[in-house]
Amino acid sequence: MRPLCQNQCLGSICMAGKNATIHDVAERAGVSIGTVSAVINRKSTVSQHTRRKVLQAVSDLHYRPSAAARRRLQPTAEKSVGLVVKEINNPYFADIIIGAQMAAKERGYNLLVTHTERSYDLERELVELLVAKDVDGLIVNPLLDDNADLSHLFELKRHNIPLVLIESVRGLQANMVDVDNVAASKSAVEYLIENGHTHIAHFTGPKYSMHSAERVEGVRRAFSSQRLIFDEDDIVPAGARIDDGYTAAHHYFGERGKRPTAVTCYNDLVAIGVYRALRELGLSVPDDVSVVGYDDIDIAQYASVPLTTVRVPKREMGGRAAELLINSIESAGDGEYERVFLETELVVRESTTRVHQEA
Amino acid sequence: MRPLCQNQCLGSICMAGKNATIHDVAERAGVSIGTVSAVINRKSTVSQHTRRKVLQAVSDLHYRPSAAARRRLQPTAEKSVGLVVKEINNPYFADIIIGAQMAAKERGYNLLVTHTERSYDLERELVELLVAKDVDGLIVNPLLDDNADLSHLFELKRHNIPLVLIESVRGLQANMVDVDNVAASKSAVEYLIENGHTHIAHFTGPKYSMHSAERVEGVRRAFSSQRLIFDEDDIVPAGARIDDGYTAAHHYFGERGKRPTAVTCYNDLVAIGVYRALRELGLSVPDDVSVVGYDDIDIAQYASVPLTTVRVPKREMGGRAAELLINSIESAGDGEYERVFLETELVVRESTTRVHQEA
DNA sequence: GTGAAAGCGCTAACAA
DNA sequence: TTGTTAGCGCTTTCAC
């Protein structure tokens, strides 16, 4: 009772919404579906003549076997986990990806990576895509949005799909791996204060980043615990990328003429951008301005002035996230949620110095 | 004729190889599979009591609906393409990914990224994984290996899965997007020669990279066309990363005491590594040594000495690859293979200078 | 409200 | 060598 051809093909362009199925091919080739299947799977039981007819039909119809359907019977189904990060062009995430990949591989899983590029809708869409692709679990680095609809994340629970968060989300109970950003940021600033700095600016990250909010909070706490006054103007919106730091620093040091003795940055990329702006303004690091980064990405130690920064164990974060996830997958995750906080470390290089006494 | 429970569950740990199916849940809850399906899909036709029983069984059995099976009927199947790159922690690839992602998105497709991290086996495995995940097409940045078994790539043809290559592979006919590396590398060296340099070294990329081989070839041609002698010792094996450049340069300039007036590098990362080694050896860029990179990644212009480099249109490459692929998907790809070569440009910044006449 | 049954695209026996 | 058929795990009518 099947129509002759489900698709309406016009020349080489297939007009149909539906793709050709094995039935269509069988029909066009005038053979049974079993035979088509045999050809597709390179069984040696098919005659040259029949094979040729089938291949012709396959090609005419642009037939593609549905991977979903064929996989079912092969219990060899590869294990995989999905990873959703915010930015792909950031060495910080590259390391997280590598850490996750290695740990997953170790356990026999492969990693599928997607990036949301700051779009909240995309985050939702990609999570759904990964679920549709039947990954065994998900690691998500969520966008921060106070009005956010978290339903795509809650949906995972309903489907019993294990989830590990990198960076926390308000209002969602889940496994998580992160560092204590407030504490790390606070101690970086305290280090500067101990070295005589009293006027310190902080270049913040993107609005959508929980980490950025936490790091700002750390700066605030460092000041208040040292009883120093703190000017809101010295919280400077920058972003996550090199040129964000560059632009923000030019504006801050140039147009607004501010002259703190030290600057802490959302991340190392921003710090590198700040470097260039300072160089262009004739200010030297660290003699005129001390600069502190965050993350300790590879290039931090390769900068003209090796960068003092907060080292985040990026690979370990990715690795732990993958392990947590896979444990959760394999134990069918009825345990409590785990929240893992990894250690950071202030790596002092040459971009910071004790403040000159002349003040 | 089904056994009572396909799985043997012990406490909370599921010992079975097979996962629970909708049948298992139905059985445990004492209802039909239709009812279970209704609960999973939040139909409002189920009584509180039944729903509760089902949910309990779902939870007991750690049941997860198979996405593959459920997707079949929903023709809303999201469109997606897979991307396989060699290294994820390289800004070059980050830009390619972003370009591909944007172009794909534009056409209604999402991108699934994987990285092979220099492993040939992994490349094969990931291609197979992506096919199993039913992506509509694949963009692959292949590892170079002369003994390589390309069957995983040929397999794609048999399954009518469109493929676009970034970087060519010997012996494989397929769509491709690339730049002319030989020409670009040649003209970079020629630029140096025009500026009086006669002793030039080249720091090569990884062995698995076709691009690296092509760039070396470009250097050779520049020399021979200028009738300059060329010492094989000045082809220095480095790699693709910052520390590869650093290590190689230390070895070359330090231990072996070579002193060319200019260096061209496989990529910008290597160049940045070379910068640091030169700095540590007390050599200045460009006064003692001119340095040329390749790719023009973001940090190139942010380096202490802004880097002269060959600009590769990375985003455009990713974008064109995605477009080619999607055209091929939607036209069911019976056209000829397309090979697209994009333009490069030598961007002269401050890391190169005319050679001092003192020689 | 719930169950039975058909069908999705495919593979793997097993007949013919 | 080829065709037929019984599933795979799920959703969706359509009776009961």
Image (cartoon, coloured by chain):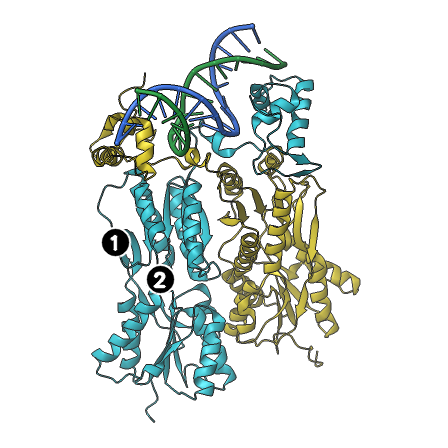
Chain colours: A cyan, B yellow, C blue, D green
Q: Which badge, 1 or 2, is on the more N-terminal residue? A: 2
Q: Number of callouts in the render?
A: 2
The image position of residue B243, as x and y in percent, is 50, 62
Residue drawn 69% across the image and 77% down it: B355
Q: Which residue is mark 1?
A: A339
- Of residues A131 and C2, the one nearer the viewer is C2
Circle 1 marks a residue in which chain?
A
Residue drawn 64% across the image and 29% down it: A58
> Residue B157 vs residue D8: left or right?
right
Residue farthest bottom in this picture? A358
| Residue A144 numbered mark, or none | 2
Image quadrant holding the C terminus of chain B, namely bottom right
Above or below, A194 against B53 in this view is below
Residue drawn 62% across the image and 75% down it: B349
Secondary structure of residue under mark 2: loop
> Residue B290 vs residue A112: left or right?
right
* Cα distance between the residues tagged 1 and 2: 18 Å
Above or below, D6 against B233 in this view is above
- Of residues B184 and A301, the one nearer the viewer is B184
